[in-house]
Amino acid sequence: MGAKAENGPKPPPPVSSPPPLKALVKLKTKQQELLIRAAALALIYVLAFAIRLFSVLRYESMIHEFDPYFNYRTTLFLTRNGFYEFWNWFDSESWYPLGRIIGGTLYPGLMVTAALIYRALRFLTFAVHIREVCVLTAPFFASNTTLVAYFFGKEIWDAGAGLVAAALIAICPGYISRSVAGSYDNEGVAIFALLFTFYLFVKAVNTGSLSWSLASAFGYFYMVSAWGGYVFIINLIPLYVLVLLVTGRYSMRLYVAYNCMYVLGMMLAMQIRFVGFQHVQSGEHMAAMGVFFLMQVFYFLYWVKDMLNDTKLFQSFLQITLTCAIGVGTLALGIGMASGYISPWTGRFYSLLDPTYAKDHIPIIASVSEHQPTAWSSFMFDFHILLILFPAGLYFCFKRLSDATIFIVMYGLTSMYFASVMVRLILVAAPAVCLISAIAISATIKNLTTLIRKKSKAALTVSSKATSNLKASAKALLDQSLPFQRNGAIAVLVGAFYLLSRYAIHCTWVTSEAYSSPSIVLAARGAHGGRVIFDDYREAYYWLRQNTPPDAKVMSWWDYGYQITAMGNRTVIVDNNTWNNTHIATVGRAMSSYEHEAYEIMQSLDVDYVLVVFGGLTGYSSDDINKFLWMVRIGGGVFPVIKEPDYLVNGEYRVDKGAAPKMLNCLMYKLSYYRFGEVTTEYGKPTGYDRARGVEIGNKDIKLEYLEEAFTTSNWIIRIYKVKPRKNRW
Amino acid sequence: MIVNIVQLTNQFSSSVLDISCEPQVPFSDSGKQELIMAKSNASDAQALVRSLRSAYAATPTNLKIIDLYVVFAIATAIIQVVYMGIVGSFPFNSFLSGVLSCVGTAVLAVCLRIQVNKENKEFKDLPPERAFADFVLCNLVLHLVIMNFLG
């Protein structure tokens, strides 16, 4: 080959493979970055699942609270009897004697999802019980939400913002509160569906592709099947389209995205029986239809303007078309609303626009604690530093306006307004707040780190090269004029990391202390610091299941209805669905009347057992005596014979000797405090001392004429009474 | 020479026309203005229709076929609405599914037209086969849902 002679063939190079760490370092930067991103996402996925498992570790794997028991019962029915039976189910075990059309009055998404996961696991021969699947559905979907948040963040800003958004939403307490393990409720799945639909829609608007719009229509269908809060989507997206049209960002992609999503989404949504024809008949959905027609007119005019290149002719055409369109539109809307065909906004959603409406007109909605306006402490508790980063993120979004950032700004602002009106809706604002804060964090950290790295690079080049270039010398001067810029950047960076670590600590503490209690099992610290468990609820329900005839009917306040049907397996008079206000008012009236009046009402309803929750012995404050005034208000709303001032003394609610006489002799008082006058609850206090109210009760010598005590749990939390049959005539 | 005669006749005819257009009975000023405005509106509308027609004739044939399909779908929807007005809307789900299938295919066809139109710069790197495949897929989903909803 050349003049240089070779001694022979070279020996083959050593064949040993490099150790894995070296192989990692040998990867190109792009691959390294991808690996880091994938690893971070996997860790975030596991974190989101793990942080929600506190109650399963501390208590046991059980369903929490009230509503999830209904969802559990329906999922059980679905897995045992199949989809057709489920879809056409009429339940005669609740709302006796009316019954309830369950198939047509629930949102099936959650149950069908859990049943599918159950079937899939069974197919892979994992012998799980449906209860385990139900308990762990919410954490599983919370992990999926973090993935969607990553992709959404990537779509809006960049991959860094996506990663931060995923990390923030994995531990955000506002989201954790409704998606812990055991909280088998619609919101656990619905927030995933919400964010997924929004992501697909923004992707459709960015790409203008029909297949992404179809995917967003399917996402919307899943959301409609999962939660009644889908009304938020069907109003936010038209509002967004309107804002884009008004700001002049109309484009063909927007037309394709919105129209395909609206028509297909509407068709799919009408397949859910509970939603029915609301998309064309209800006032809450009319904004979407209005924007649909507006878009047709708008783009038609746009097309004609393109075709005619003459402005004068186009002006006249514009005038004619606009007057026709506006005339027809207002006429149709006017006729629809006046004739009542388009129903006005229902009370549930109207109270979001006018927060004082529910208190005056619909006491049932006003009585739910989750429906109260939000205090600042709740915001701080649920969002921590995200509350401060939210305006910063808004600033960054406005700096780089695009179709996607306009969307997230609108989502953030509207959801924050609704979150301030109703505590429960902090959940809907959580993804928006996490995304916008992620933009702030990601942009700030990126700027700071580039500042740090650029400074060191510039210093190096200046020191290595000769400064013949004027620009380089000027830059060097500038750099030297702010000598502490780099240190300042490092200090701010350290501060940012400190804040984020405090956020993580806060979220973990909040989840552990506040949001992981099953509500059906109570825990307290005993005298020596040991943990004391009160399992009275399940004790009472199982007593009902095992000691009463199968066709017994149980009357209780509506809070406990779902739990009684699911665990006690007995027919109830009213339950948490609260679809019939008069029926609930009848029960409220019975609870607030004298015993002989209540007996007549109970005979008319065929009641066999009455169940009452009492917290006087243990100091449990969510008992029926504390809820009693709501029973009076709801009963009095339908039966004017029940008047709230009869139960108050000078406007004050009391249960001791100074209480109103009607209060001391009503059914609820008697059933709660029967035989309580003989009990010593605290050392040094007289007998009959009510630990929840902190007073000695007024009427200690209670005699029951028409009921007899059937069962009281070990800590007196639940008391069950049997209704005596009518005496014989002689 | 002939050109001169033509020019003269043109001028003569225009002047004659002007005289003949002048009303014999003197009207009031506003009446005259109204008449002139009505004439200008009519001539404007005629000019509008003419220019629209000429501009539309320039569109390529495949787009015209799609436009024809859209018009057909909307006409079918209108016929259904008129029928509902006559007969009443009792199986409301059937009526809705019929009308929405027409409106749906019309809207999807318009989306296809937008994506296939070579003048739209936003979609210039979208192959028309992909646009048509998306169109077919969306129509398939729409009609499956319609068939479920038809009752």
Image (spheres, coloured by chain):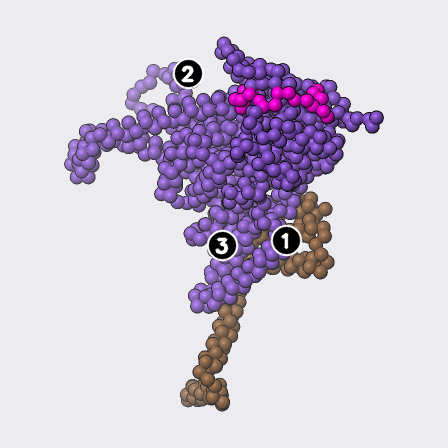
Chain colours: A purple, B brown
The chain that hosts pointer 1 is A
Query: Circle 1 sits on which residue?
Result: A341
Depth order, front residue of A299/A38:
A299
Instruction: Specify the segment rendered in magenta.
Output: A690-710
Q: Which residue is mark 2?
A: A19
Q: Secondary structure at mark 1?
A: loop
- In this rendering, does residue A37 appear at all? yes
- Binning the other alpha carbons within 10 Å of mark 1 as few (below 14), some (14 to 19) or many (20 upward) gives some
Position above or below: A502 against B124 = above
Q: Residues within 10 Å of mark 2 (few under 14, many from 20)?
A: few
Q: Residue furthest right?
A: A730
Q: Which residue is mark 3?
A: B118
User: Does B115 lie within the magenta span?
Assistant: no
Please give the name of the residue rendered at 58% of the width and 52% of the height, measured from the top-left corner: B107
* Whether residue A533 can be seen here: no
Q: Position of residue A688 (x, y in %)?
A: 58, 18
Cα distance, mark 3 to mark 2? Answer: 55 Å
Observer-nearest residue: A141 or A692?
A692
